[in-house]
Amino acid sequence: MREVRKKICIWLFDITKMPYANYFKKNEPWNITRTELCHFPIQSLGYALGQFLITNDFHLIPKLERHDAYHVITNYGTTVEEEIALQFFFLGNGKTSLYLFAVITIGFMLLPEYYKNYYTAYLHGKSCNDLYKWSIKALLNTPLHKIQSNLFEQANTSNINV
């Protein structure tokens, strides 16, 4: 039964991602491929993102590119329950959006057995700087370890100086 509930979550994501990107996201697409990302310096977020995309056989979704970078930065995986946990991370991190609230509500209702993971992700997000405010595209050349260490610094690092 759990696998059916997970498939429902995947189906909901698949049918909502493009309308969400087209009608709600106002940012410009990055216009970069995973192959181009792999030409960034080896220690950089860009390179790590390219490797993540290739390893998972993903391609960047225009206007939603930051989402995959968030997986790389936070180390949350791509299973259904980890995708939901990532949204709980961002709830704890201070992000608010209709889509986020829909994902956490539906995800919690369909997969309540992961509530401890969700709560842990929420607390993790509360303990970090406001990642959702950072200009991720501007950080593609930045070493991933610097981004991750700045995420946990006490001071506000909305503008990472590297």
Image (spheres, grey):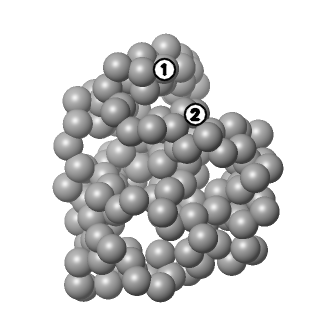
Tally the numbered discs. Answer: 2
Sequence-earlier tag: 1 or 2: 1
* On screen, residue 15 above or below 161: above
Residue 108 at x, y percent in the picture: 32, 34
Q: Which residue bears the numbered disc 1?
A: 18
In the image, 8: left or right of 27?
A: right
Q: Is residue 108 visible?
A: no
Amino acid carrying mark 2 in the image? Ile
Q: Is residue 160 visible?
A: yes
Q: Residue at x 75, y 74 (%)?
A: 42
Asked whether 103 or 51 is in front, the reply is 51
Given contact means CB atoms under 8 Å apart, are the residues at marks 1 and 2 in contact? Answer: yes
Compared across the picture, whether 55 is left or right of 116 comes to right
Estimate how packed mark 1 is, as few (under 14), some (14 to 19) or many (20 or more) residues with alpha carbons within 10 Å.
Answer: some
- Residue 150 lies, in percent from the top left, at 39, 80
Q: Is residue 98 shown above or below 153?
A: above
**Residue at screen point 64% across, 72% down:** 44
Relative to 159, does residue 75 appear above or below in the rendering?
above
Residue matched to label 2: 61
Dot 1 amino acid type: Met
